[in-house]
Amino acid sequence: MKDENKKKLRTIDIAYTGLSVALIAVCSWISIPLSVPITLQTLGVCLVAGLFGLKRGTVATVAYILLGTIGVPVFAGFSSGIGIITGPTGGYIVGFIFTALIVGFVSDKQSGKLAGIVIAMIVGILVCYAFGTAWFAYVFANKGEPMTLYSILLVCVFPFIPFDAAKIVIAAILTNKLRKFVK
């Protein structure tokens, strides 16, 4: 009986992970192209980590990134490849892992508490901004085009704050409403 429960749990983990990867990919394809595209990826990552917790949310996020890195067109604009990860927006994609870790951890600890999830999503997105902004600065400095921190923030962070705030609200509400249906 115990082996059957382990198998059932493993099967549901795989199913949730696959669905989560697909959700993040679909969210990445919904995009408004700017210097750094506005996508729903952060909404997808926050929702997945909020719903499925630390382990499942982080595994799904890493699987999504690995799929995109090996050539499956799951990134914004149906793009893929190592060039996306090493390009100017790669730091934001890597930052998704830390967003999933933060949101998933809090989701596991504070199941059902909307305020805690919202704060975790805000912190997770800020950490993602930090990784992405640092990587963006590094890429442009190596191209011989160094930019000031303020100019990078003007391009990579400030225009996205209102959109990410809206995505956090949507992801937090959906997490709060749907969490009771997740096994």
Image (cartoon, rainbow, N blue to C red):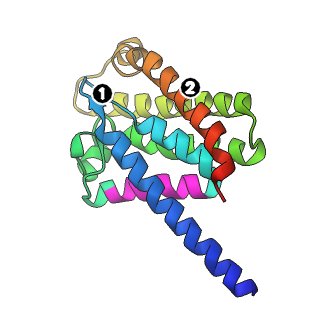
Instruction: Label 1: state its secondary structure.
Output: loop
Q: Residue at x 35, y 48 (%)?
A: 25
Residue 141 falls in image quadrant: top left
User: Residue 120: which disc?
Assistant: none
**Which is nearer the eye, 84 or 143?**
84
Q: Amino acid at mark 2?
A: Val
Q: Which residue is mark 1?
A: 36
Where does the image place residue 91, in percent across and percent down from the top left? Answer: 40, 38
Q: Amino acid at mark 1?
A: Val
Left or right placement of residue 43 versus residue 7 in this view = left
Dot 2 and dot 1 residues touching (CB under 8 Å): no
Q: Residue at x 22, y 27 (%)?
A: 144
Q: How many marks?
A: 2
Q: Earlier in the sequence, mark 2 or mark 1?
A: 1
Quarter the C terminus occupies? bottom right
Instruction: Label 2: state its secondary structure.
Output: helix
Q: Residues within 10 Å of mark 2 (few under 14, many from 20)?
A: some
Q: Which residues are magenta?
A: 56-67
Residue 123 falls in image quadrant: top right
Where does the image place residue 87, in percent across and percent down from the top left? Answer: 27, 40
**Label 2 vs label 1, nearer the camera:** 2
Q: Which residue is mark 2?
A: 169
In the rendered image, is residue 62 in sight? no
Q: Residue at x 56, y 52 (%)?
A: 57
- Does the magenta run of residues contain 61? yes
Which is the main secondary structure of the residues drawn in magenta? helix
**Which is nearer the eye, 162 or 141?**
162
Left or right placement of residue 153 versus residue 141 in this view = right
- Does the magenta run of residues contain 105? no
In the rendered image, is residue 139 in sight? yes
Where does the image place residue 27, in percent across and percent down from the top left? Answer: 37, 41
